[in-house]
Amino acid sequence: MKQRVLVASNRGPISYQFGADGSLTGQRGGGGMIAGVTSGLAALGPEASVTWICAALSDADRAVARSQDAGTRDEEGIPVRMLDIPPGILDRAYNNVANSALWFLLHQLFDTPNQPRFGREFRRDWRSYLAYNEAFADALTQEARIRQTARAGGLRVLIQDYHLCLAPRLLRERLGGTAGDARIAHFCHTPWAPPDYYRMLPDDVGLALLDGILGADRAGFHAERWAAAFMDCCAALLGADVARTGGLGGPGPGPVGRVTYRGHVTEVAVHPLGVDAPALRERARARDVRAHVGALRQAAGDRKLIVRVDRTELSKNIVRGLAAYSELLATRPQWRGRVVHLAFAYPSRSALAEYRAYTDQVRRLALEITEEFRTADWNPLILEVRDDYPRSLAACALADVLLVNPIRDGMNLVAQEGPVLSERGCALVLSREAGAAATLAADALLVNPYDVTETAEALHRALAMPDAERRRRSAALAAIAAADPPARWLGGQLASLGPSSQALPRRRSRRAGPPPRRVPAPPGRPRRRPAVTRRWRWPRRSRGRRRPAASAPRRRRADPRGHRRRTEPNGRLARRPGRSARRPCPRPAGAVR
């Protein structure tokens, strides 16, 4: 029987645009999360029946959502259902809450003297975030009920990222009694903030986000430090019962703890996401990528290449990376004319003023570096602020040094793709605050992302590294990156959900009384046999009960020691000569009848 899998995420695996003639054309959705989940689902093959639910983010997407049927599919053939959420609700939920509040919180990006400010406008935005999550929960519930799945296959729901923190609890409440047949997982692709920083959120908002994720059977993170911070928040803010496994002893994957809250157990686990090395290398052999390889090689000549590929995202730390390159040229003049920095910074979240200002700052600093160090025959920096995936692959293939210095990052796939694509071996300068540092630390040059001088020194070490050492490190990094491909990452999550739901044991009924206790041996007397376990029972009441007739036959039954004893007509053990009648055990202190 096929396993039924539902995936929910803000951005889907396909997006649409209007052509010049008004026709609709689709292209693959961008981002590391989309690439990882798509590759993982494709690897499931015919053994799973998959539907991907996402939001319609553009006017073209909404046109598709209003006219779509169950046959809408992405490039991999995965059925996609787009939700036509009202634009006002989508904008407030996505831009004002998810991106302006939650993203900044989880990456610890707030300029705290000025931000955040949670006023009336935020309360309105929060209601939109709730409505947005309710729309996804309603769609997931509908899919779960329309296409009922036999128990042999099972229903698995994979909810992605911080946009949908409330959805697991909302879905569980909507499924009601049928929730036991479904297994829900939530995966956070970002870091998680420690309790002291997380408390910046309004109390009700912070509690609701944690409670929402704990509606899932499994909460996943890319690195153990993010999972540990999440469990710390659950214990400190919710007062939830948190049981930790003591750590993985490595980068994962595996469970790191269990959180019990509101009668439900959520397993917290780590699943590092790697890359599909064979598919990535095959894509890099395509004609468009090879054309860019030739153009970049000609532009760089025999100079060494420092490459970075990022979105113009505040957490990616592009400005400090450029400052470190400038300091390298200023303090190590031997590299002038011998190195070129290829910085590909793709536009991101241009609807937010902070991101537009940051992009302008990147452009200004790049211009200053070029004007200060450029010569007639040497351009020290090539900056591209546009999305060009084939050119990015070509740059990674040619890189001598790959610079990845985020302030904080859930994982970072570029740090893994670079060594996999490298043709001559690349040295990786990596921020210790990236989730990928948990797996790549041994062969990367780790830096403090706030320390520009340390980053400049690491760039010098990487450029001066012997070729053999650079190739050895690059091969080791590539092997680690390929060890957890998307298929294994997603398959591990599905397998970990198991065949049945996790729930707390049923509460003991009042008649069952306290749990069994050990009866200690009398003091001073040696124990000849193990202590007898005796169960406490409520005393019998004789008032109001009908006694058996006097003529009722007497019978024999075994006493607690196993001896056959005669019983009275009322069922009690007959009194032994010279001994008092047995009485019920006294009621324990504090017991309520």
Image (tube, grey):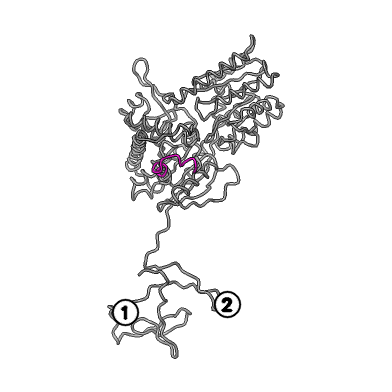
Of the image marks 2 and 1, the number of the one nearer the N terminus? 2
The residue positioned 72% from the left and 27% from the top of the image is 466
For the point 51% across and 45% down, which residue is it? 269
Q: Is residue 205 magenta?
A: yes
Task: Find the distance from the CA under tag 2 to the CA under tag 1.
Answer: 36 Å
Q: Does 148 sit above or below residue 576?
A: above
Q: Secondary structure at mark 2?
A: loop
SS at circle 1: loop
Q: Is residue 290 magenta?
A: no
| The one of 576 and 115 positioned closer to us in this rendering | 115
Q: Residue 268: x percent and y percent?
A: 49, 46
Residue 133: % across, % down: 36, 38
The crowd level at tag 2 (other Cα within 10 Å; few <14, some 14-19, many 20+) is few
Numbered label attached to residue 527? 2
Quadrant where the image shows the C terminus: bottom left
Q: Which residues are magenta?
A: 195-208
Q: Nearer the viewer, residue 531 or 71?
A: 531
Q: Residue at x 65, y 15 (%)?
A: 301
Magenta stretch, main secondary structure, is helix
Name the side, left or right, on which 169 lies relative to 379. left
Q: Which amino acid, mark 1?
A: Ser
Vertical comparison of 35 with 204: above or below: above
Residue with the mark numbered 1: 542
Question: Where's the N terminus, which quadrant?
Answer: top left
User: Residue 548 lies in what quarter of the image?
Assistant: bottom left
48 in relation to 347, above or below: below
Closer to us: 374 or 331: 331
